[in-house]
Amino acid sequence: MKTVVDGLEKELGDRLIIVRLNIQEEIAQELAPVYGFEFTPTFIYFDADGNEVWRTVGSFDPQQVRDTLQ
């Protein structure tokens, strides 16, 4: 999924911020219970106000990101 996410970041980087967390790092372990993710990869899409719009585990369709931005 890294290649897909990297591509979206190049394509849409002026319209969204992508944050990557490594579950092995301390900050990710602290955020996991806050945002309720247990499995990797987990993709969570937040709107500009910080509200969760959707989430998916395992993989996602990059078109869903594009559609959500519209």
Image: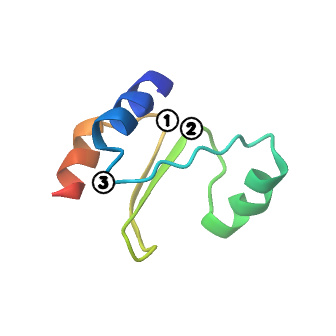
The residue tagged 2 is 41
**From mark 3 to mark 1, how far is it between C-alphas?**
24 Å
- Which label was assigned to residue 10? none
User: Badge 1 is on which residue?
Assistant: 58
Q: Which amino acid type corresponds to the residue marked 2 in the rendered image? A: Pro
- Callout 2–callout 3 Cβ contact below 8 Å: no
Residue 58 versus residue 4 in the image, above or below: below
Q: 20 and 41: which one is in front?
A: 20
- Disc number lying in front (3 or 1): 3
Q: In the picture shown, does residue 45 fall above or below 50?
A: above
Closer to viewer: mark 2 or mark 3: 3
Q: Secondary structure at mark 2?
A: loop
The answer to whether mark 1 and mark 2 are in CB contact below 8 A is: yes
Q: Residue at x 18, y 50 (%)?
A: 67
Mark 1 and mark 2: Cα distance apart in space: 5 Å
Residue farthest top in this picture: 3
Q: Secondary structure at mark 1?
A: loop
Residue 68 in the image, given as x and y percentages of width and height: 23, 56
- Judging by the rendered image, the residue that carries numbered circle 3 is 15
Q: Give the mark, 2 or 3, whose residue is nearer the N terminus.
A: 3
Label tally:
3
Whether residue 56 sits left or right of residue 33 in the image: it is left
Is residue 47 depicted above or below 23 in this figure? below
Give the residue displayed 40% in from the left and 77% down from the top: 49
